[in-house]
Image: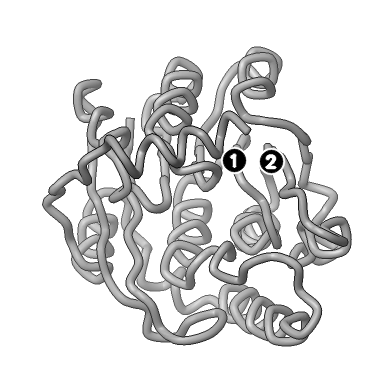
Amino acid sequence: MAGYADLCLDRLLQSRPDYETAGWEDALRELETLLGGAESILREQALAEAEENARRLLKSIRAEDPFLQRWAADSVLARCCYLVCRLLKPEVVMETGVAYGVSSAFILKALEENGRGTLHSVDLPPLRREYERFWGIAVAEELKKRWSVHRGASGRILPELLGDLGAVDLFLHDSLHTRRNMRREFEAVWPYLRGGGVILADDVERNRAFGELQEKSPAYWRVVRDREQHPLWGRAAPVTFGIMFK
């Protein structure tokens, strides 16, 4: 209920930020300069398999799906998750928001290719009929050995979980996109994010929370705005997400 109230207040009171943005190809060139190896990773067979599996799955469940398929991670952000995981070789990845588990599947596929790392996913499942059948359905059984799921609101789960883990290499925000929730998650994660660690955040155009991270003087900060070329479901749609290196 608090989350729905925040959504309503954001729509009434929050002005949308006017971020300077870059297209995905421009962001890729910047990542290539920062880390190297991006182009070869995007040609990996494991990434192509993750994309095909997601497309097949989302198409197969469409007739009985109780969720909204726009909740699935878009194809550009999913590729970015895979790419950053392969480049960073993280030990600890954390995400908020699961739904079908599309971003989870791409991250876990990258960790499997790396041969190291664990994904901790924090999510409060939606109150939808038969949600248990579809929650995390995109994650293949063989990838689950690297997956730890924590059920509950991020505001309640994150503080204790972060304290237990001690450090995080990569954090993905894809839960409730209100300014209050995004700021709360970023503030909780920042002290535990390793130097050189990365924050990815979906739908950052909805409020100013991601822009406020610039006050922490990150090594790299960019908002990507583009349009899908090969969507995982439905028609190609505009995408906006943020990338930040500590």
Q: Disc 1 and disc 2: Cα gap in Å?
A: 6 Å
Q: Quadrant of residue 178?
A: top left
Rendered position, 23 above or below 232? above
Q: Position of residue 131 (x, y in %)?
A: 82, 58
Q: Residue at x 85, y 62 (%)?
A: 142
Tell me if mark 2 has few (under 14), some (14-19) or many (20+) residues whose alpha carbon lies within 10 angstroms of its own: many
Tell me if mark 1 has few (under 14), some (14-19) or many (20+) residues whose alpha carbon lies within 10 angstroms of its own: many
Q: Quadrant of residue 239?
A: bottom left
Q: Earlier in the sequence, mark 1 or mark 2?
A: 1
Q: Residue at x 58, y 29 (%)?
A: 2
- Tell me the amino acid under the disc marked 2: Asp
Query: Mark 1 falls on what kind of element?
Result: strand
Q: Position of residue 15 (x, y in %)?
A: 21, 41
For mark 1, what is the residue?
Answer: 96
Return the residue nearer the eye: 139 or 70: 70
Number of on-image labels: 2
Q: Residue at x 77, y 46 (%)?
A: 147
Q: Position of residue 159 (x, y in %)?
A: 62, 16
Disc marking residue 123: 2
Q: Position of residue 103 (x, y in %)?
A: 59, 59
Query: Mark 2 falls on what kind of element?
Result: strand
- Tell me the amino acid under the disc marked 1: Thr
Rendered position, 115 above or below 231? above
Q: Residue at x 47, y 67 (%)?
A: 79
Are the residues at dot 1 and dot 2 in contact (C-beta closer than 8 Å)?
yes
